[in-house]
Amino acid sequence: MLEPILGNGTIEKILFTLESYGEAYPKGLSRTFNIPVNGIQQQLARLENGGVVVSAMVGRTRLYKFDPRNPFLKELRALIKKAMEFLSEKEIQEYYSKRTRPRKKGKPL
């Protein structure tokens, strides 16, 4: 949906994931979308250099999230949310609504 504006589909997938989960890391994105890690890392570096995302080391993992200081963040997130409305239910279930943390032991479903 936003691929023509953003330049490629990898960035679109990264932004949709950040909108859905709040943060992401390259290896997880690579596994989810079956894209080589270095391709994900290149696009994340491009987004970070452009001030769209920021990263921080958490242990040995570099986590990425939207840069809260970006002056266009509110508008960008609104555009992403609008574009996500046009995704198929299958895509949403497969990529953007997975549980990211384990369920507490003994907690009912």
Image (tube, helix red, strand yellow):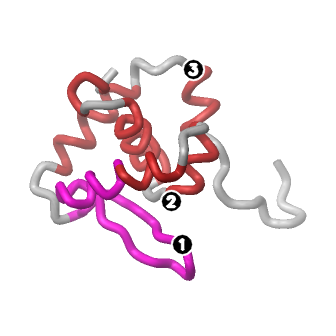
Residue 4 x, y percent position in the rendering: 25, 22
**Residue displayed at 56% across by 78% down:** 60
Give the quarter of the figure containing the N terminus: top left
Residue 26 x, y percent position in the rendering: 50, 56
Residue 104 x, y percent position in the rendering: 79, 65
Quote the CA–CA distance across marks 2 and 1: 7 Å
Contact check, label 2 and label 3, Cβ < 8 Å: no
Residue 13 x, y percent position in the rendering: 43, 37
- Asked if residue 39 lies left or right of residue 72, the reply is right
Q: From the image, tell me which residue sits under label 3.
A: 89
Q: From the image, tell me which residue sits under label 1.
A: 61
Which secondary structure lies at badge 2?
A: loop
Q: Specify the segment rendered in magenta.
A: 43-68
Determine which quarter of the picture holds residue 81. top left
Determine which quarter of the picture holds residue 75. top left
- Dot label at residue 94: none
Which secondary structure lies at badge 1?
A: strand
Residue 55 painted magenta: yes
Closer-to-camera residue (69/12): 12
**Along the polypeptide, which appears first: circle 2 or circle 1?**
2
Contact check, label 2 and label 1, Cβ < 8 Å: yes
Count neighbours of disc 2 (C-alpha within 10 A) and say few if under 14, some if 14 to 19, many if 20 or more.
some
**Along the polypeptide, which appears first: circle 3 or circle 1?**
1
- Dot label at residue 25: 2
**Residue displayed at 16% across by 65% down:** 69
**Along the polypeptide, which appears first: circle 2 or circle 3?**
2
Determine which quarter of the picture holds residue 103. bottom right
Residue type at the position of mark 2: Tyr
Quote the CA–CA distance across marks 2 and 3: 24 Å
